[in-house]
């Protein structure tokens, strides 16, 4: 009777011993799969962004910044940008100098809000939407962390960006990955100017913005921040852009605008219909810090055919009417 009772008893599958064996086996399997994948990645490393293999501009004077091999900034925080018709993600790793005063966008993320939209993002999308169907690129001089570049790229436009500050280049590279626009955005670690060479650049410690060629211009808005000097490469836009059509040219370089425009004389001298729509920052204080003026810029633009400029805050929008 005892043996008969044992034969009829139901077998318990989920015993503590069986569960422990199952969990141990699963962990070993996961570890094996992980090690196998790591070995395969080391033997077959990820391919670089397509844009690095097939640059928009193949110029022997300067090569595009290699986002694939650039060290990543940490920590990385990304969020959608608010109020944009064509959405894109923005990466920000700057918490500010003081722990109790983090960057305003970090504060927004902690509250569950999207990143605050800079005016330039909306402006770029509004202008480029009117140009859809036309052949041409967007040139972003003083790209900073890429707010204008990505606004254009997510619309499908090719972007040529110039940014000399390495920390900003890291943010641009992160945005390239987040927004999947590696084939559209080409960035150069250089300051656009009116000559080829090098120049002393003044960078603010603890700030992603407001660095400038002029030391006065760099510290004009943030006098309490430490300023350091770095050497950056300079190159005129005319040395990079030859026959390629340009739809929109945006320049925001903290007072160095006149020198950028002078280095783009050939581009700006194109006839109406082929010359780019121009946006540049026209802040008299910053211009004077770089030994130029709004009057000097307007006279130069008139000489190359830009005879219609309107003011939008501290930005000037210029086109050719004839």
Image (cartoon, rainbow, N blue to C red):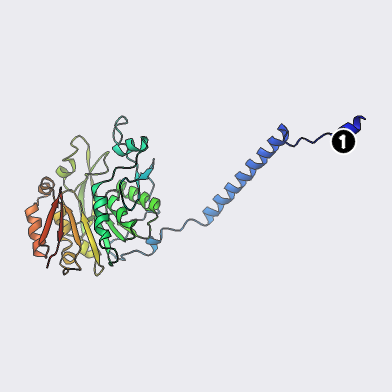
Q: Is residue 89 visible?
A: yes
Which of the 4 quarters of the picture holds residue 28? Answer: top right
- The answer to which of 14 and 281 lies nearer the viewer is 14
Q: Quadrant of the C terminus?
A: bottom left
Horizontally, residue 188 falls left or right of residue 286, namely right
Where does the image place residue 279, in percent across and percent down from the top left?
A: 18, 55
Q: Quadrant of the N terminus?
A: top right
Q: Residues within 10 Å of mark 1 (few under 14, many from 20)?
A: few
Q: Residue at x 28, y 45 (%)?
A: 117
Looking at the picture, does residue 282 appear above or below residue 101?
below
Residue closest to the eye, 302 or 206: 302
Task: State whether residue 190 appears in this view.
Answer: no
The residue positioned 7% from the left and 59% from the top of the image is 299
> How far across and how far down the image is residue 321, in percent?
12, 65
Q: Quadrant of residue 4?
A: top right
Per the image, label 1 sits on a secondary structure element best described as helix
- Read off the residue under disc 1: 7
Which residue: 22% across, 61% down? 237
* In-front residue for pair 262/270: 270
Q: Position of residue 136 (x, y in %)?
A: 27, 65
> Residue 266: x, y in percent?
17, 67
Lateral position of residue 48 relative to residue 219, left or right: right
How many badges with numbers are in the image? Answer: 1
């Amino acid at each position: 009777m005892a043996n008969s009772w044992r034969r009829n008893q139901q077998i318990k599958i989920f015993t503590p011993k069986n569960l422990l064996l199952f969990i141990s086996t699963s962990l070993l399997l996961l570890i094996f799969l992980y090690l196998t994948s790591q070995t395969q990645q080391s033997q077959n490393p990820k391919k670089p962004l397509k844009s690095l293999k097939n640059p928009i501009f193949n110029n022997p004077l300067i090569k595009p910044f290699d986002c694939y091999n650039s060290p990543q900034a940490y920590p990385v925080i990304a969020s959608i940008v608010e109020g944009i018709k064509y959405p894109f993600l923005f990466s920000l790793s700057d918490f500010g100098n003081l722990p109790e005063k983090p960057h305003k966008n970090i504060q927004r993320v902690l509250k569950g809000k999207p990143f605050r939209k800079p005016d330039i993002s909306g402006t770029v999308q509004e202008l480029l939407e009117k140009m859809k169907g036309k052949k041409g690129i967007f040139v972003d001089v003083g790209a900073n962390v890429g707010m204008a570049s990505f606004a254009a790229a997510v619309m499908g436009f090719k972007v040529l960006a110039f940014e000399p500050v390495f920390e900003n280049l890291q943010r641009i590279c992160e945005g390239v990955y987040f927004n999947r626009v590696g084939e559209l955005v080409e960035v150069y670690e250089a300051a656009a100017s009116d000559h080829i060479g090098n120049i002393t650049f003044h960078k603010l410690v603890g700030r992603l913005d407001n660095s400038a060629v002029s030391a006065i211009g760099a510290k004009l808005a943030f006098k309490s921040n430490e300023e350091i000097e770095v050497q950056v490469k300079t190159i005129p836009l005319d040395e990079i852009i030859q026959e390629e059509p340009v739809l929109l040219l945006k320049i925001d370089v903290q007072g160095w605008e006149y020198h950028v425009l002078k280095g783009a004389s050939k581009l700006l001298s194109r006839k109406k219909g082929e010359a780019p729509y121009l946006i540049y920052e026209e802040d008299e204080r910053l211009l004077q810090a770089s030994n130029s003026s709004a009057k000097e810029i307007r006279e130069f633009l008139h000489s190359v055919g830009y005879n219609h400029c309107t003011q939008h805050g501290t930005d000037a929008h210029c086109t050719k009417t004839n």
